[in-house]
């Protein structure tokens, strides 16, 4: 029985992939698989689009030339590669795979030697890290915030009514308190959804800067820059106004 070694990783990152990134990633995969310089290797791309369609090709140029329109945008690119006798295999998933949405980057490497697997994993891992965006850490601040706010509201209410004698608390007070909690939860949830929508637009989880996707991403960058400078200018103006106000007084 031949030895089989496997190394896999899953990352919750915000990523941006363009033509250069894809070509460099393919080059890294090919160099890893062709370590003996005489092996025949295969590589396949599986592209998943937002309209439910799927594309399979062995040519990276067909992936790069994909239209990637807003109505048929690329959601996931899976790269499957291996050598001629299937003793070495590399599987990489970029974007929303549809199974574990939070994991935007994942890979699995299998081989017949431990050294090759871990060396290849190190090279591919290093290449994938170049896709990671600075705002990736904020992707994890999600449901936990809502749970915390909900818990704080409930705790505050329970604390407020616990100071009263049980007999002094009427049914109307219970009903009123419960209604207030429900109303606050709804308001917080709506605010969360609105902020989440705006945040996900300005800081998208996965961006494929391919074909029409380049223009869409450039528009997001431009809008993000305008918002940043608008906030910065407003902050400076408010500081100067405050200083002038206290100087006059």
Image: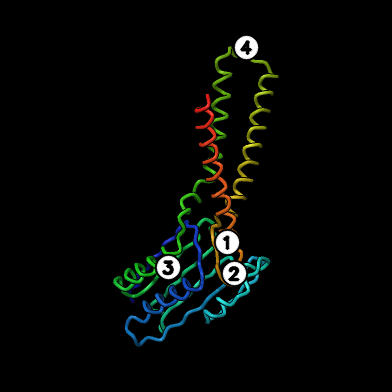
Which residue is label 2 attached to? 48
Q: Residue at x 54, y 21 (%)?
A: 159
Residue receiving disc 1? 98
In the image, is 55 to the left or to the right of 239? right
Label 4 residue SS: helix
Q: Mark 4: give few (<14), some (14-19) or many (20+) Cα within 10 Å.
A: few
Q: Quadrant of the rendered structure where residue 166 is? A: top right
* 13 over 194 or under it: above or below: below
Instruction: Tell me the distance, in whole angstroms, between the alpha carbons under discs 2 and 4.
Output: 62 Å
Kindly give the residue lying farthest to the left in the view shown. Answer: 115
**Image coords of residue 84 (percent x, y):** 42, 84
Q: Nearer the viewer, mark 4 or mark 1?
A: 1
Whole-percent x, y for residue 221 in the image: 56, 58
- At 45% from the left and 55% from the top, the residue drawn is 134
Of residues 1 and 206, which is closer to you in this image? 206
Disc assigned to residue 245: none
Query: Who is closer to the viewer here, 189 or 39?
Result: 189
CA–CA distance in space, label 4 to label 1: 53 Å
Task: Say whether marks 2 and 1 touch (CB < 8 Å).
Answer: yes
């Amino acid at each position: 029985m031949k030895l089989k070694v496997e190394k896999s990783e899953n990352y919750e990152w915000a990523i941006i992939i363009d033509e250069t990134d894809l070509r460099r990633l393919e080059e890294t995969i090919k160099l890893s698989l062709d370590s003996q310089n005489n092996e025949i290797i295969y590589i396949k791309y599986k592209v998943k689009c937002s309209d439910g369609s799927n594309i399979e090709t062995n040519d990276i140029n067909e992936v790069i030339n994909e239209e990637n329109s807003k109505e048929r945008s690329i959601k996931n690119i899976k790269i499957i590669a291996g050598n001629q006798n299937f003793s070495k295999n590399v599987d990489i998933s970029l974007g929303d795979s549809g199974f574990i949405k939070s994991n935007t980057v994942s890979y699995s490497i299998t081989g017949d030697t431990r050294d090759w697997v871990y060396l290849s994993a190190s090279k591919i891992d290093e290449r994938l890290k170049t896709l990671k965006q600075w705002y990736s850490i904020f992707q994890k601040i999600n449901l936990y915030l809502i749970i915390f706010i909900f818990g704080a509201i409930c705790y505050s209410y329970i604390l407020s009514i616990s100071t009263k004698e049980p007999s002094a608390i009427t049914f109307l007070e219970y009903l009123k308190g419960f209604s207030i909690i429900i109303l606050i939860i709804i308001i917080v949830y709506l605010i969360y959804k609105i902020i989440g929508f705006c945040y996900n637009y300005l800081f998208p989880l996965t961006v494929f800067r391919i074909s029409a996707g380049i223009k869409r991403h450039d528009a997001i960058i431009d809008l993000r820059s305008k918002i940043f400078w608008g906030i910065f200018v407003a902050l400076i103006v408010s500081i100067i106004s405050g200083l002038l106000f206290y100087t006059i007084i």
